[in-house]
Amino acid sequence: MSDQQELPETMSEYADPENAELHTSSGKGLALPGQNLPDKVYIIPIHNRPFFPAQVLPVIVNEEPWAETLELVSKSEHHSLALFFMDTPPEDPRHFDTSALPLYGTLVKVHHASRENGKLQFVAQGLTRVRIRTWLKHHRPPYLVEVEYPHQPSEPTDEVKAYGMALINAIKELLPLNPLYSEELKNYLNRFSPNDPSPLTDFAAALTSATGNELQEVLDCVPMLKRMEKVLPMLRKEVEVARLQKEISAEVNRKIGEHQREFFLKEQLKVIQQELGLTKDDRSADIEQFEQFEQRLAGKVLPPQAQKRIVEEMNKLSILETGSPEYAVTRNYLEWATAVPWGVYGEDKLDLKHARKVLDQHHAGLDDIKSRILEFLAVGAYKGEISGSIVLLVGPPGVGKTSVGKSIAESLGRPFYRFSVGGMRDEAEIKGHRRTYIGALPGKLVQALKDVEVMNPVIMLDEIDKMGQSYQGDPASALLETLDPEQNVEFLDHYLDLRLDLSKVLFVCTANTLDSIPGPLLDRMEVIRLSGYITEEKLAIAKRHLWPKQLEKAGVSKAHLSISDAALRAVIDGYAREAGVRQLEKQLGKLVRKAVVRLLEDPEAVIKLGTKDLEASLGMPVFRNEQVLSGTGVITGLAWTSMGGATLPIEATRIHTLNRGFKLTGQLGDVMKESAEIAYSYVTSHLKQFGGDAKFFDEAFVHLHVPEGATPKDGPSAGVTMASALLSLARNQPPKKGVAMTGELTLTGHVLPIGGVREKVIAARRQKLFELILPEANRGHFEELPDYLKEGITVHFAKRFADVAKVLF
């Protein structure tokens, strides 16, 4: 069978109708007068597309079945044969159903026949339509038929001419849309005349990409108008398809043109840089760096100011030499500016059940703190988002402030970042250094955002009460902008010099005491107090968290090492009586290490630690559960320190009666010295009122001592305790046993309120003191305490010192 392809190089030789001797007059039919056309011709079936009279194309066929046919044609007088279209080529061209051929084909003249690699090739010059009349030989090639040449009926000249002009215009419209049509085709088209439309119509049909069967219908159509009516829509469709294809190509080129332009510019830049003596490796690394910057910014929503600044810096970097000092500064700036997660926010988990589960799982006790955190999360869940807030967790060491912050982050599903501001002296640690300094870096907040990769993390500022201050700056003042919800929407980092939105960040600060935090900074934070733990809470924490943690740390299984509840309670009471659980964790770690030594000696041993085993591993108990002694001039007070609550015994004694005097010992601070002076003056002036000898202090030298003299002590809550000790001494009467007290005293005998009620109540329970005297103004603070702290405690609320004396004596 055959394949057809266009060969514009050879077409000009045969394309001219005058050279081809194919010129016909309108209305004279297709019989081509003046030419001797054969009545009998050999045929070759072709597939893919029919061959039209207006075409001049190379034809390639297999040598095996058609060699004899072409040889006979070349010896004939006319050198012509007929080409007929077959939609489906036969399996064997030597035996096929002749009825499958259409009636109409094209008579062609054969030029330049040749053989090569089993193929026969010749140029076919279309002459005229031909119709099979009779098969003379149809069993095997060469096939011979008797043919006739159909005559075209006469038709209206004006209408045919109009269609001819429409065809020429459509073809001219198609030519610029399809680059495959060469300039020779345009010249070929100009030679056609609307007055001779038959070859023009066939030529137009051949230009289209219609199917073979559609083109065969055109070949079968002899009447001119009917044929033109078929071809014109096909040509119009071809024009529309070509136009649509051109639009698609233009759109695709527009999209990729920008990338190509960038690529070409980068390649040109490489050549320019090489000419300037810059190394290839350095500049290729720069190109990769630019691409890395662009990748980092993908998916981020930059404010217009930041977008403009980064583009300016990248343009600046592209023209700087790598050896320039400013090159490294600019490149480092872009590293940080593109690392900020502009406009990237994590999704919050606003599920209170999940939050409660996380808090209970990580913390035993602290029920009031958990409730406060859940209230905070509930507001966010109701609103649909948790906006940035500033929470300050205040409490003694080891009570779990940092772990509470982690639990808040986990319950919200936000990333957690912690850095300590304790001892920080330079405000540049918060707001960054100016770029003019060598080794300048952004502040800790920008570094935090870079690490967590979202703009709404939980950031913990640890030990905020221990910030320093020096000639370099005041970091506490630098935090004012950071922790102010009204200002941190446009937080300005000195290094980036760009506005950052920190309003969605949840800041959690921790401190041991509020005294050293500046007032303006404290005013911006919401204070949540974490007090110490009582023995029962410590026991639960040790069993659920601390002991399993130490076993895992040492790689010891529970089957080989265990500890009884009684032993845990003994460790808490005898070795770790502080407010938090850090010392308790250390003691449990020491027990595990001692046990591991024994397990190395006997790997199969099963060790069960009891109360009798503690002294061998931990030594003698640091604290002993001794009865709080009371006697004349001895009163137990309650104090609050940064380490939590503590009991504070105060002793008063009479040294001699030679002269009057008053002496204080115990390394007391200025506030406690003032309290002692006030207590001494009040008791001295009102001694007779409270049943004492009015002349006692006139003839006595009194010594007031606060034990553990090496430990500094200060605070406004010991006045009542000191006055009670002096009154007990003056009356020579011991106070009521098992009573502890706290409160400040005035010269007129009023009892002033104090702070740290929760810590002091816990300290009293720890010493098994269940009768307390508190200022009347602190009644509300006591009522707010959890029921498990108030259980079994009797509290007397005093407005004046007379109320205290009434309880004690």
Image (cartoon, rainbow, N blue to C red):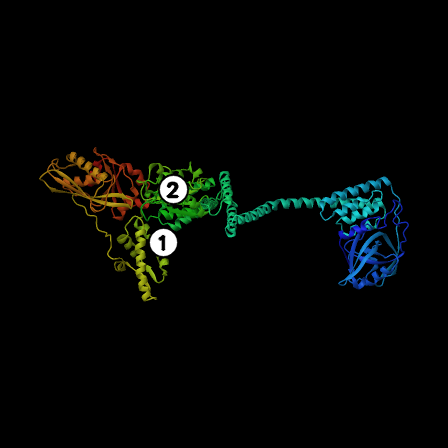
Report the quarter where the N terminus lies. Answer: bottom right
Report crowding for label 2: few under 14, some 14 to 19, many 20 or more residues within 10 A (C-alpha). many
For label 2, the SS is: helix
Q: Nearer the viewer, residue 634 or 75?
A: 75
Residue 257: image quadrant is top right
Q: Nearer the viewer, residue 216 or 434?
A: 434
Q: Where is residue 796 in the image (x, y as percent from the top left)?
A: 25, 40
Q: Position of residue 663 (x, y in %)?
A: 16, 40
For label 1, the SS is: helix
**In this rendering, position of residue 80 left or right of residue 415:** right
Report the quarter where the C terminus lies. Answer: top left
Residue 757: image quadrant is top left
Residue situated furthest top in the rendering: 748
Q: Position of residue 672 (x, y in %)?
A: 22, 40
Residue 419's tag is none
Can residue 523 be seen here? The reply is yes
Vertical position of residue 511 compared to residue 64: above or below: above
Can residue 89 be seen here? The reply is no
Residue pointed to by mark 2: 428
Residue pointed to by mark 1: 545
Residue situated furthest left in the rendering: 658
Q: Which of marks 1 and 2 is nearer the N terminus?
A: 2
Q: What residue type is labelled 1?
A: His
**In this rendering, position of residue 529 left or right of residue 646:** right
